[in-house]
Image (tube, rainbow, N blue to C red):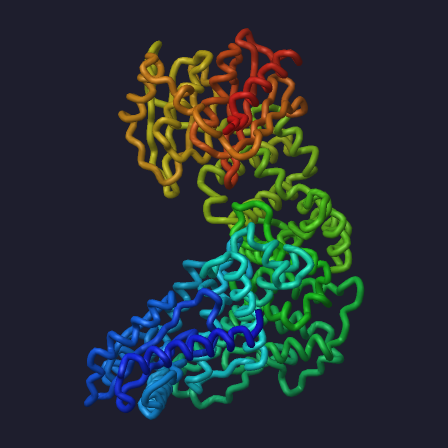
Amino acid sequence: MTESDRTDRTTAADTLCSAAFEKSGAPVTGVSLVAVGGYGRGELAPYSDLDVVLVHDEVTDPGRAAEEVWYPLWDSGTRLDHSVRSFPEMVEAARGDLKVALGLLDARHLVGDAGLTMRLRTTMLTAWRRDARSRLPELREMVRSRHEMLGELAHLSVPDVKEAGGGLRDATVLKALVASWLVDVPHAELEQARHALLDVRDVLHEVVGRGTDRIAPETWQPLASALALPDERAAQVHVRELGRRIHHLSRLTWRRADALLAPPSSRRGARTPDLVRIADGLALSRGEVVLHARARPEEDHLLLLRAAAEAAERDAVLAPATAERLVRDGAALPDPWPDSARQLLVRLLASGRGLLPVWETLEDAGALDVLLPEWQRIRLLPHASPIHRFTVDRHVVETCIEAAGMIRHVARPDVLMVAALLHDIGKGGLTEHSIAGEPIAREVATRLGFEPDAVDRIATLVRWHLLLAETATTRDPEDPATVALLVDRLGDAENVTLLRSLTEADARAAAPQAWSSWRAGLIGGLARRVMASLEDRVPPPESPATLPARLPGEGEVEILVEQESDGARITVVAPDRVGLLAEVAGMFALQRASVRAARAFAEGDHAVSVWYVADEVVQPAVLRSRFEAIVDGRVDPTARLSRGRIGALDPSVTIRPEASRQATVLEVRAADRPGVLHLALAALARLDVTVRSAHVDTLGPQAVDVFYLQEASAGALSEPRAAEAAHAVRAVLTPADDG
């Protein structure tokens, strides 16, 4: 699929429209058929609609031709988006609807009165240039809302090549901005990326066999073959790179447009020179960091980092031409870096939201190949986990942005920021990424000039950056083995504090739901216990649940519901017995409550379970009714929930002997579906196995349930009993055979 294919499709459509117009008997003067939008630009994809308008002047009545012109097009099977309007109606529609105005900028004559079409084009373009200053804020908000809703083409797991940030819609908006004569964009660069993305959309239509702009995961491989690319990874990089380039051009252009439209801060400010010196060799011009006339890039090896840090901290644009010159002509940094260079890098990383556009400019200019050549390992690399909203490289930048807000909570902000930059640097290979990343992080930190102790800390944080989150959500913090594991891995209190901040930043950057108040409480509580152990003191008692003033007696149950900002916290208290937790889990499963996490533990002779339910308001009376129906035998949740498939993949059921010396730890990973937890607990109850504590968490599409098991008479399970329990759980969670 090439531009010539689009030209052929457009020519064929033009011929079809001309024949339909002539057959309709429409007047040859005062009426014209006009192509608009993508058809007007001659950019038809294989399954595109034809956007056409039958325009007539103020004195001409097209009569029945206004209807007759469409019938031959419909009969041909063409997908049509059509309208009939007088010239004044066109002008009024463009004035009242920004989308109409943008579409008419691409109006192209098809057949009929060419003079009328020329008049329409001239009027629309003149009005656009005349009113651009007043209309651009509305267009800016339209673009911002679309980006916020759909995300960015370069980083979405299922990218939309048209509507996502950096897609074809943005390229069209950039062309409209250029048509306003207010701002300019690098024309050759934009057109090259735009036409390449049009090729991708054409091939996507052919591969899928219908009109679509979204690239589903299973489409990448056939797309790669059709684009003559070696593999799926190459196809992803190709498409995402195009989206990243267009989005970066869009971001820069809008920053320039915003600066142009912003009123001067004062009359005096309006008269001052446009070039303001801000640092050695640097000046600020119209919101962009540029080189000062006295700058000597070939003599100042810090100038590139200084320019980037100044731009990011000021939330200003790092002028692309400036970045390119500094990469081309700037003095090389020594190895290892001097302290001043490392401090500038940390300033850049800790600049907050201003980091993202500056980092993209550095990447475009080739600066990252000089400053951090390891970046190529993760550049535009998709995340394997669906919980991540960004590609790996963008996730890393977002982690730095999140970590920047936490630097006042740690003793070594520089270590935190560089660890945030490098925490996923090991991804993209066959080795587990935290293991692969440790030696890379050690090498980079050494090159950056960190002292040996800081190098060790950065390497430790990269190696164990998942440890605190995984342990807090899958292990019993009351078990001495849990705390001992973290003490052994982290070594001292400073590493614990740094890892606590890195864990939060990493989770917040992954997805909004990845850092809930529940998860924050679990991780914070575990970190405090580890700190207390390192300081050789007894940790303060935790309060995992709000208990009722009077604990329920035999045959009773107490259910408390507490609303939180991101869901509901539901506490269930009842006299302890084998099978109780399975019944509580069945209650939630029958309610179809969206359980994101849960904890269960003993409080004397009572069992307490705390459930975090996301976006649900559950009435205690309704839950109690369901629970009583299960206990009385009127409802059997196992019979209802075991029908059909539990998930597409077999569950993973593993015994973890290293996790506790007091209980048998059973770890279950399965597809997240209602009833998974109940079925597992019911299987254990049938074996008369006591669940001392349970730790339930949902990570994307996967449920991770960890049970601390003991015999009813107390004590860990024997090896045969542990194997029996694992087999029973695996059996009830294994997908049913559809055959």
* Residue 618 visible in the shown view: yes
Residue lying furthest right: 335
Q: Residue at x 31, y 22 (%)?
A: 626
> Which of the two residues, 535 or 478, is positioned nearer the viewer here?
478
Quarter of the picture containing the N terminus is bottom right
Find the residue positioned furthest to the front.
23
Describe residue 233's horizontal placement relative to residue 518 as left or right.
right
Q: Is residue 659 above or below residue 399?
A: above
In the rendered image, residue 558, in percent from the top left (x then y), is placed at 33, 20
The residue at 80%/64% (across/down) is: 335
Measuring from the top left, give residue 147's x and y in whole percent.
44, 63
The picture quadrant where one finds residue 463 is top right
Q: Position of residue 69 (x, y in %)?
A: 29, 76
Q: Who's the residue at 32% across and 91% down the image?
A: 119
State the residue lying farthest toward the top. Answer: 713
Residue 26 position within the rendered picture, expressed as x and y whole percent measured from the top left: 26, 84
Quadrant location of residue 605?
top left
Residue closest to the eye, 634 or 48: 48
Looking at the image, residue 445 lies above or below residue 610? below
Determine whether 329 is above or below 727 in the image: below
Q: Nearer the viewer, residue 88 or 511?
A: 88
Badge count: 0
**Is residue 716 placed above or below 275 in the rendered structure?**
above
- Residue located 71% across and 82% down the image: 296
Visible residue check, residue 265 = no
